Image: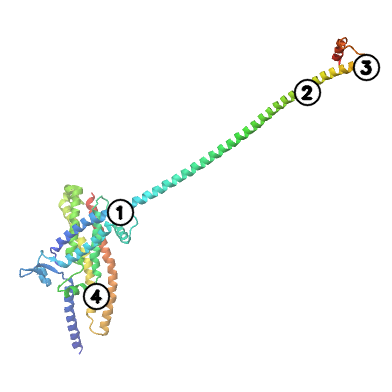
Amino acid sequence: MNINATLLAQLIMFVLFVWFCMKFVWTPIVAALDARKKQIADGLADAERAKQDLELAAKRSAELLREAKEKAGEIVASGEKRASEIVEEAKAQAKVEGERIITGAKAEIDQEVFRAKEQLRTQVSAIALAGAGKILGREIDAKAHNDLLDKLVAEI
Amino acid sequence: MSSEMAQETGEVAHEAAHTSAEYIHHHLQNLTYGQLPDGTWGVAHSAAEAKAMGFWALNLDTFFMSLLLGLVIMYFFRSVAKSAVSGTPGGLQNFCEWAVEFVDSSVRGSFSGKNAMVAPLALTIFFWVFSMNLMDLIPIDWVPLLMKSLGVPFFKVVPSTDPNATFGMAIGVFLLVLYYSVKMKGAGGFFAELAFQPFPKFLLPFNLILEGVNLIAKPISLALRLFGNMYAGEMIFILIALMGGAWAGFSFGGVTLFGSQILLSLGWAIFHILIVTLQAFIFMTLTVVYLDMAHQEHH
């Protein structure tokens, strides 16, 4: 239990071990710890960001959906409007067409009537001549009584 | 008749005391290498020879045990540190990380300055001192008997029961305290701290004596606390071992002594685990505190 040079040896060993520990033990272990700390922090930050992104995306998709619904409603409404317009137009056109057809038919009828009257008139004058000839017993000179006949035809 | 018996027991006790004293001395003697009285260099074979060697002698047992333990610890930590990963750590890395974080948090708790050296220093101190103290739990006769069979006269297996070891470390710490005191406060500031407080300046010599004692007391108390605790623990192990050594045949007393030795050494060893750890922790913490004081200006 004497104090001797062991003291110096111990002191030198102490210094060397501390130096070694500082250089080759402490630094790498603390570096690994720090790296892990950073990894964890990064992971948490990423998760947080992803969560925010997800929320944002959800909000955006909801908005898109709402817009799409609105647009679809608008489209349906305008479609309905257009359809009723088309129907109205068709109705109006049909009316016009109908009227036109009716007027045409009426004109035709008038024409037919007029032609029939003409025919009838000529036939009536012929019948009247034949009748009158029979009544009078003689040939009526058509030329002589032409203007008389014409007057008759016009009267019918 | 009764006086005869008393004489007889006295003789036995005297003989036992003689061998006990030898036993104790043998266990407390370091294996010292130095210059022998005849001028040659070699290992001392008695306490007197070891004492006669003076300062320039080396306690081989303390030296090799502390070197071996330091190397084992550094090798262990180094092997883990080399393959330290930032991902999921394995078992050994877990332990080392726990150790590093334990030391780091105690350093953070008591060291307010910024110095990259303090925490590794504390780690080295704690585990080195702890391992040296832990040698106390090896049954005290094993290593000396083994060494005796190899022809080595003495072998103290616990380096921290050698004041050389504890003072060596304490002086290392003291030098660091001086270095950082001067570095942080300047030579003048350090002197002012020693000379101008706690009393006014005109009491300068008195202040110097007071603060000087305060300063010197740091390494001495650091070294003696560890040495004293471990030495006393060792001593008690030796005394407990003597009880079994006093066993002579299957008498009632002999069996009782043998049984008590087992029980007492078990109990003391279990209690000693606490002391071993605590002393290592105290050495570490006080080192950190002293270095903290060296870094701080306190007026």
Which residue, given by chain and number where applicable, does mark 3 sit on? A134
Instruction: Give the residue drawn at x 28%, y 75%.
Output: B264
> What is the quadrant of residue B124 in the picture?
bottom left
How far apart are labels 4 and 2 at the CA level? 151 Å
How far apart are labels 2 and 3 at the CA level? 36 Å
Badge nearest the viewer, 4 or 1:
1
Question: Of marks 1 and 2, which one's residue comes earlier in the chain?
Answer: 1
How far apart are labels 1 and 3 at the CA level? 146 Å
In the picture, the quarter occupied by the N terminus of chain A is bottom left
- Residue type pointed to by label 2: Ile
Chain letter of mark 1 equals A
How far apart are labels 4 and 1 at the CA level? 47 Å
Circle 3 SS class? helix
How does the figure colour the protein chain or chains? rainbow
Residue A24 lies left or right of residue A46; in this view the side is left
Bin the neighbour count of mark 4 within 10 Å (Cα to Cα): few under 14, some 14-19, many 20 and up. Answer: many
Circle 2 SS class? helix
Bin the neighbour count of mark 3 within 10 Å (Cα to Cα): few under 14, some 14-19, many 20 and up. Answer: few
- Residue type pointed to by label 3: Lys
Q: Residue furthest bottom?
A: B1
Badge nearest the viewer, 3 or 4:
3
- Asked if B23 appears above or below A15 in the picture, the reply is below
- Asked if A122 appears above or below B243 in the picture, the reply is above
Badge nearest the viewer, 2 or 3:
3
- Asked if B42 appears above or below B191 in the picture, the reply is below
Question: Of marks 2 and 3, which one's residue comes earlier in the chain?
Answer: 2
Which residue, given by chain and number where applicable, does mark 1 sit on? A32
Q: Tally the numbered discs.
A: 4
Chain letter of mark 3 equals A
How far apart are labels 1 and 2 at the CA level? 111 Å
Which residue, given by chain and number where applicable, does mark 4 sit on? B240
Residue A21 at x, y = what percent?
Answer: 23, 57
